Amino acid sequence: MALSGLERRNRAGDLRSEAICQRLAAIVVLSEAELDFLRRVGSGPLSLWAPRSFVDQPASDHPAPRYIISGWAALARELQDGRRQFVQLLLPGDALCPLLHVRQPQTVLCLSMVQTVDGGAIRLATQDPHRFPGIAAAVEMAAAHDRALMIEQVIRLGRQTAYERMANLFVELHHRCSTVGLVHGDGFAFPLTQESRGDLLGLSVVHVNRTLQMMRNQNLIQLKQSRLTLLNLPALREAAEFKPPQVMHVGA
């Protein structure tokens, strides 16, 4: 039975409110009270960011993080001559503001329409580990997980071939999207343009397209209408050598 417009909007709202909850619950077992707390944060007032816009960082030495509840963004570094490198992709459930308060010439670029919510309440929860032990541990471990993904990006750019880089990226995204319920039939939304793929993988557009065509010809992937489907996940995993980060919380 088809859903009405109101029902579709309500379902979309439910999915968005779950993004932070699913992201952190995939790392640490959270209590029902903590899950409800994160759902309330996820259903809070929205900030909307258009594709290709930059997310403004709050003017504060200790800004509360924003959390993405829908859409994709990238942590980017642009050189004076216009060359650009994407350091890391940011997906639903991810925090936009890093925990390390280091002033660097990096920007958060929206790759699609992005919706964010204020994460001030989550920051306060991490400061009350007796009341929110799971959230405090999950936020700490999520930051460690993000650092591990940055190391993966360094290895991807420094030592892998173009084919291996792309396979590694696809397998990583499949893993990350699956943890927040965005994978259906081994496919997920993939809003990266040709230029963005090159900025992420350190390849020219021509090289990106050549590699994609090779994977299509080998029946490994299907990329159609901004949706990527991994048709042979075992083969891609073998080429990628991607292993999901394993992080451990060390309590006080």
Image (cartoon, rainbow, N blue to C red):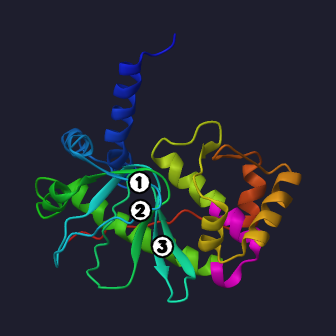
Q: Which mark is residue 152?
A: none
User: Magenta stretch: residue 239 in it?
Assistant: no
The extreme right residue here reads: 217
User: Magenta residues: mostly which secondary structure?
Assistant: helix
Secondary-structure class at tag 1: loop
Secondary-structure class at tag 2: loop
**Residue pointed to by mark 2:** 53
Q: Residue at x 50, y 58 (%)?
A: 111
Q: Is residue 194 above or below residue 6?
A: below
CA gap, disc 3 and disc 2: 27 Å
**Nearest-to-viewer mark from 3 and 2:** 2
Residues at circles 1 and 2 in contact by the CB criterion of under 8 Å: yes
Find residue 17 and report its horizontal and vertical position in percent: 31, 40
Q: Is residue 35 visible?
A: yes
**Residue pointed to by mark 1:** 50
Relative to 202, is 123 on the left or the right?
A: left
Structural crowding at the residue carrying mark 1, measured as other residues with C-alpha within 10 Å and reported as few (<14), some (14–19) or many (≥20): some
Relative to 240, is 196 on the left or the right?
A: left
Find residue 246 and report its horizontal and vertical position in percent: 48, 65
CA gap, disc 1 and disc 2: 5 Å
The extreme top residue here reads: 1
Q: Amino acid at mark 1?
A: Ala
**Residue pointed to by mark 3:** 148
Query: Counting residues from the N terminus, which is met first, the one under dot 1 or under dot 3?
Result: 1
Specify start and end residues of the magenta stretch as a single range: 157-169
Find residue 248 and report its horizontal and vertical position in percent: 38, 67
User: Magenta stretch: residue 167 in it?
Assistant: yes
**Nearest-to-viewer mark from 1 and 3:** 1
Q: Is residue 242 visible?
A: no
CA gap, disc 1 and disc 3: 29 Å
Q: Nearer the viewer, residue 246 or 214?
A: 214
